Image (cartoon, coloured by chain):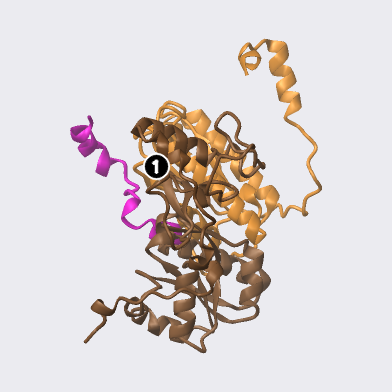
Amino acid sequence: MADADVKTPVAEGDEASGEATDEAPKKPVDPNFEPEIIVFACHYCAYAAADLAGSMRLQYPSNIRMIKLPCTGKLEVIHLLRAIEAGADGVYAAGCLEGECHYLKGNLWARKRVNHVKDLLTEVGIEPERVEMYNMSSAEGAKFAAAATEFTERIKALGPNPVKRPGVDAHVAARDALGDAAMPDDPASSAASEEGHAE
Amino acid sequence: MITAERKPLDEILELVGDKKKVLVAGCDTCVAICLTGGEKEAEILASELRIKAEQDGTGAEVEHTAAIRQCEWEYLDMIADKVGEADIVVSMACGIGIQSMAEKFSPQLVVPAVNTNMLGMPQEHALWLERCGACGECVIGETAGICPVVRCSKSLMNGPCGGSHDGLCEVTTPEKEDIDCAWHLIWERLKEQGREEMMYINRPPKNWSKSSSGGPRKMVREEAKPV
């Protein structure tokens, strides 16, 4: 790890070329497939990063649908499963950088739960790559856009969720599963009052 | 508390077979505390079964519920309606709860989704250690509050044996690494208590007929029986 931090132009060039790795043969990709992706974003980092990405006029796929949480630690196994069950093609949690969670360890819990859901999906025959955990700070608008792009491309390559049913809105189902734990989408409705409660 | 671990999904699917209306029944007492079979886990298993049914096109409908305790008749009354509507009940309770369900709702088909494994203590969050073998004749009054029946790999009554090294038991497998030698622990605590002489008690062979070796056990409290 320490060596990787010392970046030279040569090393970066190597890294870039190394990304194009050969993977196992995949199903034919439908060029018209537009995946439905649910993002569980933490209020303090990832949601703010999304806001920043917007302010920076960064482009990222419109496939992602956000659900704001006070912390990704609020995310439970069943919330991720419900989204997949309702037909979401991919689901990811986006929390603060590790070690910088507003609630100390919420994002670490979220990562464990995401990994557990990967195991459960494998058990039922769904690709575990359909769920993921990303970390970013509120200042990393570009990282938010990159995560959205990377994940969307990954799901496009995987193809549609095999249990997708017509007429079921995965975003609504995922939000319903969270109940009161999901925060309103409008940042203006909560940002002002948050300041007063900040410790 | 009683602890259990969920069975592999394939085994559960085999037990469920081609039944169309499936009820996953959690139990909100011991197996909920050990994060295996409470309402949350019942909901997760139901979700997995639905995803599987959708993929396989079986048309199975899967719901979940939970009883406060599946091992008591009164609490089973509270989920009777849901049980009645199902073709099969997949119980996530311990063996006691599963059998209570099967008896109460006979001839309803009730199958287990968990393996009941021990009477364990939550040593720390998400870690349970076996602490009692329900042997029917407790000896820990003489062994410094440490049970040689389940904490000694050989259930020795007069330990330690020659396999005790540096406080560890010779029985070590990848799953059971670093088992403490129970008799080493007993000796250390007896010293702390100033009761080293207890170590020299010569215990005769244990009467295992009071454990499960003696056949199904029964307990009656005459003074508490309804009049």
Q: Is residue B91 left or right of residue A126?
A: left
Residue at 71% x, 22% y is: A15
User: Toward which corner of the image does residue B176 lie, by quadrant?
Assistant: top right
Chain B tint as drawn = brown
Chain A, which colour?
Answer: orange
Residue A30 at what x, y percent from top left? 72, 55
User: Disc 1 marks which residue?
Assistant: B144
| B207 left or right of A52 in image | right
Q: Considering the numbered disc 1 on the image, is that residue within a helix, a strand or a loop?
A: loop
Q: Residue drawn at (51%, 86%), measured in percent from left and top? A: B108
Is B83 above or below relative to B4?
A: below
State yes or no: residue B17 in magenta.
no
Q: Chain of mark 1?
A: B
- Part of the protein shown in magenta: A173-199
What x and y, as percent, mark residue A105?
40, 35
Q: Quadrant of residue A148?
A: top right
Instruction: Give residue A103's quadrant in the image.
Output: top left
| Mark 1 surroundings within 10 Å by alpha-carbon count, few (fewer than 14), some (14 through 19), many (20 or more) | many
